[in-house]
Image (cartoon, grey):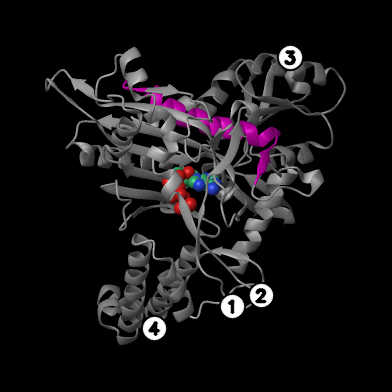
């Protein structure tokens, strides 16, 4: 774990050093859990968004996009349940004065018991070697059965307390389990309180009678309240979807792990409206499609897993997370939820407007059911960054840090370098840049040795380096160096465009989703 922490620290400082992610307001000592994206970060982020947007809207003729405002009528958040129930249970340690999410403290305690079981299994695997029957061992080993029983009882008690929003019981679990504050090491806990995660601000001057509005905590509600607008103006027929990318804000109690949990972040959400009764089939379809979208990036199939929810929100009838193996464990990157007709029905009730869809095939009106896919851009960014980062030991004792970014997501696609700064090589290199720049983000670099220039591009994940040398002036060929293999091939300038395009276009990813 310590080693993983180390790697994560290195990734965070690499992200800063190479212009991917900066702490917000850094010259004023930063603002907690808020980050800015730098010159390379914004390109990587835009490419992730483009990949998602195109996968939704280009590949599905029944999905269209919108861009709704961040401010919305405050009653929307009453209808959606966010005013009353978008809470986290918080608890303070009186000695360290640190604040924690009570549910997270208990979840971590459950995870410790899971770890204990895995350790027992790993020990036995080592002891028994080839003949080890893991399933049988898990079922029959007395020590494992004992830990498992303890874990299940704790989990049951915790789920019940969360379902009932029983704050006293949550505190009692923390006391009974003797959970200590990781900073002070004491069990001097306050009461558990509910804390609403929405940011509130005032709209209009006080003279007019200002209105309290919220910064949206999710983009989905902007889709729901525009359901009829889009359906009617786009002449959409159920099943159809509406996609949106935009900022969301949550006043997270414990914001840590870099851009994993931020107070201002970005979401890519799609609400898919279906006939009542068909939602579980569609849930399955979207669950599979979304995992395929992730896997097409080639970050490693073993890095993903589903986490099906046992405890469902009161309006949901199925929910799963797509988790990604971050350096700090498997973590949620995307949620896929079958939200029934809860949101649209609530908006019907609170607005007094009819939000039904007339289904011409069934000749009846109904409030459609909804499957939601909801992914955080920043968490996606983090998963791409973490799995791409490598410190590589090269032959001859050299080292390089390389980002093996999927080429279509890389911020810079190619860098053109004259071997030396004379003999007309810079002019020739500039000519190539001036041609390629219309289609690809292209760098020109003539400073330092060629080796150093390659390293700089490796560190930001540029898939191709093009070197112009004296031979180029004679036969219009250059060397094309590939980032991961470091292989160099001699190619004609006339072929560059095609060679690069085949590797870096988002299109090449989209084709894998057919
Ligand atoms: P968590 O349990 O980690 O708080 P959540 O279940 O509340 O997440 P959702 O409400 O389902 O998250 O939001 C959908 C997606 O938005 C998440 O899968 C995640 O990628 C992203 N997301 C949610 N909260 C944050 C945050 N504070 N910072 C960055 N991304 C976030």
Residue matched to label 1? 188
Q: Position of residue 36 (x, y in %)?
A: 68, 39
Q: Earlier in the sequence, mark 2 or mark 1?
A: 2
Residue matched to label 2? 95
Q: Position of residue 215 (x, y in %)?
A: 55, 37
Q: Nearer the viewer, residue 89 or 420?
A: 89
Quadrant placement of the C terminus: top left
Q: Nearer the viewer, residue 327 or 430?
A: 327
- How far is disc 3 from disc 4 in space, using C-alphas? 65 Å
Circle 3 crowding by C-alpha within 10 Å: few under 14, some 14–19, many from 20: few
| Residue at disc 4, secondary structure | helix
Residue matched to label 4? 127
- How far is disc 2 from disc 1 in space, using C-alphas? 7 Å
Front position among marks 1 and 3? 1
Q: Position of residue 199 (x, y in %)?
A: 57, 43
Q: Residue furthest right?
A: 422
| Residue at disc 3, secondary structure | helix
Residue matched to label 3? 431
């Amino acid at each position: 774990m310590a080693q993983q922490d180390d790697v994560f620290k290195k990734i965070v400082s690499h992200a800063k050093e190479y212009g991917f992610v900066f702490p917000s307001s850094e010259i004023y000592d930063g603002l907690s859990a808020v980050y800015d994206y730098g010159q390379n970060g914004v390109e990587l982020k835009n490419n992730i968004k483009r990949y998602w947007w195109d996968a939704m809207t280009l590949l599905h003729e029944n999905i269209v996009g919108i861009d709704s405002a961040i401010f919305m009528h405050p009653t929307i958040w009453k209808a959606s349940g966010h005013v009353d129930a978008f809470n986290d249970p918080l608890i303070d340690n009186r000695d360290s004065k640190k604040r924690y999410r009570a549910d997270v403290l208990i979840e971590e305690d459950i995870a410790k018991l899971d770890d204990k079981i895995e350790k027992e299994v790993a020990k036995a695997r080592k002891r028994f070697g080839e003949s080890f029957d893991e399933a049988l061992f898990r079922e029959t080993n007395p020590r494992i059965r004992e830990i498992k029983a303890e874990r299940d009882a704790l989990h049951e008690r915790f789920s019940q307390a969360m379902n009932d929003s029983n704050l006293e019981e949550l505190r009692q679990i923390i006391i009974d389990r003797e959970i200590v504050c990781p900073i002070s090491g004491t069990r001097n806990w306050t009461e558990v309180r509910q804390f609403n995660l929405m940011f509130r601000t005032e709209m209009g001057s006080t003279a007019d009678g200002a209105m309290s509005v919220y910064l949206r905590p999710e983009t989905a509600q902007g889709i729901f309240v525009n359901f009829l607008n889009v359906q009617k103006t786009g002449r959409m027929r159920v099943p159809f979807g509406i996609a949106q990318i935009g900022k969301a804000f949550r006043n997270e109690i414990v914001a840590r792990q870099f851009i994993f949990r931020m107070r201002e972040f970005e979401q890519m959400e799609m609400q898919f409206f279906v006939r009542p009764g068909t939602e579980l089939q569609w849930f399955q379809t979207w669950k599979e499609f979304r995992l395929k979208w992730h896997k097409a990036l080639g970050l490693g199939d073993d890095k993903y897993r589903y986490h099906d929810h046992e405890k469902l929100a009161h309006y949901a009838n199925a929910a799963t997370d797509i988790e990604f193996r971050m350096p700090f464990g498997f973590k949620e990157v995307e949620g896929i939820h079958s939200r029934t007709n809860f949101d649209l029905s609530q908006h019907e009730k609170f607005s007094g407007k009819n939000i039904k869809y007339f289904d011409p095939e069934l000749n009846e009106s109904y409030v459609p059911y909804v499957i939601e896919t909801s992914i955080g851009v920043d968490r996606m960014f983090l998963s791409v960054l973490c799995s791409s980062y490598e410190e590589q030991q090269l032959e001859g004792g050299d080292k390089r840090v390389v980002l093996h970014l999927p080429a279509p997501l890389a911020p810079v696609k190619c860098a053109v370098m004259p071997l030396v700064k004379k003999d007309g090589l810079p002019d020739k290199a500039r000519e190539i840049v001036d041609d390629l720049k219309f289609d690809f983000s292209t760098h020109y670099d003539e400073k330092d040795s060629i080796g150093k220039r390659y390293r700089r591009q490796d560190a930001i994940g540029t898939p191709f380096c093009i070197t112009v040398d004296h031979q180029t002036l004679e036969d219009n060929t250059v060397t094309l160096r590939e980032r991961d293999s470091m292989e160099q091939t001699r190619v004609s300038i006339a072929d560059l465009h095609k060679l690069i395009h085949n590797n870096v276009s988002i299109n090449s990813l989209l084709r894998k989703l057919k």
